[in-house]
Image (cartoon, rainbow, N blue to C red):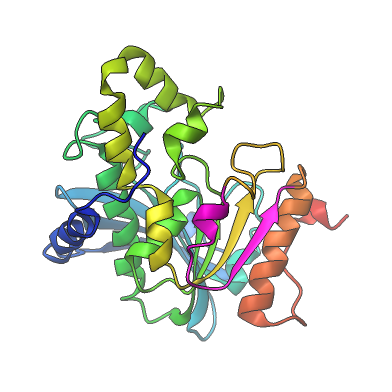
Amino acid sequence: MADSRPLDFGKFWYALGKELSDLPVAPEVSPIPLRSNEFCDLYGVTLTSVGPYRIFGYLSIPKGEGPFPTIYYVPKNASVLEVIPQGTSNRIRSRFLTFSIACRGMRNSDKPYAAMYPGQLTDGLDSLDTYVYRGIAADTIRGLDFLMTRPEVDKSKVVAWGNDNAILAASLHGGVTHVVSTPAYLVDTLKAASVSSGYPLEEFNDYLRFYSGNKKTVGQILGYFNLKWHAQSVDAVTLIMADNSSGIYSQSFLGEFSDRIQGEVTIHESEDSTYRDGLFAEEWITNYLYGPREKPILPPHWEQ
């Protein structure tokens, strides 16, 4: 397994950025009255990413005078796009502008390419040019390109929130000021997969069982996406949501990656509780964006 940064790492990512910059964002923004309410308006947004490929997102804007602190929910490894993550209080949309985006292959961004889940993480993995994650990274960046054009966005308070893609977003786009990331498959991927039997990491094990002769190539390709090599470009204030001490992506496993992040870093080791872990993240981001006197907006069932 490759344990060094690819020699042309910078060249690869510069080329992708250049390809994106040569494409107009070409946003189409349409109101969705059925999912708007007394405290926010919802819009469907279509953008052009590399390919060219049209991707879809949900933009929620609070009513009232902006600009607003913004949460960018990065593309996830799942088929369905939500306005906000399941379980999050809908009232969060009264305080934050939110934007969630479906990368290529997810529903609403599945024409002409409809991804398989599980399966997308290894689609085209026999070549760096064909690996689908190049396009997913571009889609993640494109979402931020769009956000930076919106006058309602407070450019000093932009949070990338989600899985590994939140770190990619902060590394590859200067618009991110804060990060909440739960790494799941892009930190030393093959090393993590070698001690895992669960998805999403098991996708890589499945692939290598069929294509065992490709292991060296796979390791080299994944090196371009390894968050360990992206971390040095992250200067955002960052919260890493780690597994518990016995999990694969524990604080100790993530240490080499997190130590390279240039911005202030908080690592929260999972308490094996959706409530306690979720409360920590909500309190963390509320404190940074609104100050310690402001209470986080929590799901009603957490407050009972």
Residue at the (56%, 26%) spot, across then down: 196
| Relative horizontal placement of residue 71, taking residue 203 as reference (left or right) | right
Residue 269 drawn in magenta: yes
Residue 109 sits in quarter: top left
Image point (37%, 82%), residue name? 151
Which quadrant is the N terminus positioned in?
top left
Position of residue 128 in the picture relative to residue 252 (left or right): left
Picture quadrant where residue 129 is located? top left
Q: Is residue 78 above or below residue 204?
A: below
What's the magenta region?
254-270
Give me the residue at 34% from left, 39% from top: 2
Farthest-out residue, right: 304
Picture residue at 22% right of the left edge, 28% below the top: 126
Q: Nearer the viewer, residue 251 or 109?
A: 251
Measured along the vertical axis of the image, is residue 270 above or below residue 217?
below
In which quadrant of the rendered image does the C terminus lie?
Answer: bottom right
Q: Is residue 131 magenta?
A: no
Quarter of the image where one finds residue 116: top left
